[in-house]
Image (cartoon, rainbow, N blue to C red):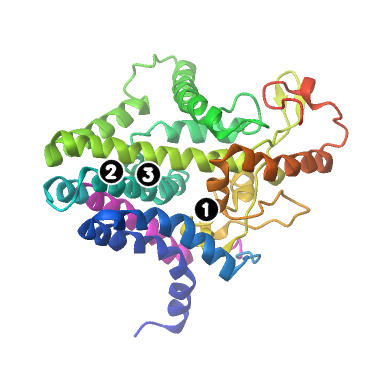
Amino acid sequence: MIPSSQVAKIQNALPFWMSLGLIPLLWAVACAGSWWVLLVPVATWYLFSALDGVFGLNLENADLETTDDELYWYRLVTLIWPVVQFFTLFGLIWYATSADHLSVGAKIGLFFGVGVVTGTVGINYSHELMHQKDRRERWLGDILLAMVLYGHFRSEHLLVHHRHVGTPRDPVTARYNEGFYRFFPRVLVGVWRSSFRAEKEMLARKGLPWTDLSNPFFRYWALQGAMLILALLIGGWSGFFLFLWQAYIAVWQLELVNYVEHYGLTRKHLGDGKYEHVMPHHSWNAAHKASNWLLINLQRHSDHHYKPNRRFPLLQNYADSEAPQLPYGYPVMTMAAMVPSVWKRVMNPRVRKWRGMYYPEITEWHPYNKALNPAPK
């Protein structure tokens, strides 16, 4: 019989296992075909938006003295997911390329949904895993990123984004008044360049060339190449292109979230190329309960940047006086980001309020930091 204390731990962790419900949904819509394939993005975007409205906000904080052993049931879902995603992704490639009832349009729609899952859940779980000290967890994070051909995200996130967030050196920080359709192509190129440069510079400090095999880019490329070859072997050229399609959708989902997380927020320049330390008010925070279950507390992003090594159950929530708050959870905000006029109408006034609240001494933002702060409109 399971001790009552252990039952309580399982019950507390269980809402964060909701992401696993997307796996049988993917298989169900694949079997049904037709327009049913659209149920997956509907569930991740609209259902969780509705659930946020039902369940409201979670303003409580976990005890920071909680040990890793006590977090077992929280950690377990992130360890299970890479295996589940691998067999689901390649199982669906095999199924879709051999099923007679799936039209070309249905296959494209199905793998759009697969990309929503591998991006919304898979990349998010890789983000949790890459921050851990355990080498095995970091490897699982690399495998998840290889499934969406975005292995360099690990180097960019750890070596560039966390160090330079809110400054011109971070390509992922969305600039004030920059629409997503300008941000997306800029960040795709900028992230690759900055991540490769960061690894090259780190090797140079050790007296090694970028071609040294310790460069993690060789691991990224090898894993990604293996995934592409496997997709080709299982599904032929059709499977190969379905794999590429879901990878693109996954990266699009990731960068939509990146766009939302830091839009218009900057760190104060102290002179000589130095910036103030990263604080909770340099990230947008969201306390919406259901979407934080799906995204394993990613929306407590203010604390993640303040204390990057905290596991997701321990991430703290911040009040309005400590960090800027999004009006809705990520599902709604990412949909809003796809309509720049709506996004700017909702978020630009909030950015201006944030500037007045945290940096009242800066009265002229345009010359202060031309790269990240165009003149307010």
Quadrant that contains the N terminus = bottom left
Q: Nearer the viewer, residue 72 or 345?
A: 345
Q: Nearer the viewer, residue 224 or 110?
A: 110
Percent position of residue 305, x then y: 61, 43
Q: Residue at x 46, y 49 (%)?
A: 128
Q: Nearer the viewer, mark 1 or mark 2?
A: 2
Q: Residue at x 64, y 67 (%)?
A: 60
Q: Is residue 360 toward the left or the right of residue 222 in the image?
A: right
- The secondary element bearing badge 2 is classed as helix
- The secondary element bearing badge 1 is classed as helix
| Label 3 or label 1, whichever comes before in sequence order | 3
Residue density around tag 1, few if under 14, some if 14–19, many if 20 or more, within 10 Å: some
Instruction: Tally the marks.
Output: 3
Mark 1 and mark 2 residues within 8 Å of each other at the beta carbon: no
For the stretch drawn in magenta, the main secondary structure is helix
Q: Is residue 203 toward the left or the right of residue 230 in the image?
A: right
- Please state the extent of the stretch shown in magenta in the rendering: 63-90
Q: Residue furthest bottom?
A: 1
Q: Nearer the viewer, mark 2 or mark 3?
A: 2
Can residue 67 be seen here? The reply is no
Q: Nearer the viewer, residue 256 or 101?
A: 101
Question: Distance from label 1 to label 2 (Cα)?
Answer: 22 Å
Residue bearing the label numbered 1: 331
Name the residue type under label 3.
Gly
Residue bearing the label numbered 3: 141
Residue bearing the label numbered 2: 108
Question: Distance from label 3 to label 1 (Cα)?
Answer: 23 Å
**Labelled disc at residue 314:** none
Percent position of residue 263, x then y: 64, 38
Name the residue type under label 1.
Pro
Q: Nearer the viewer, residue 193 or 110?
A: 110
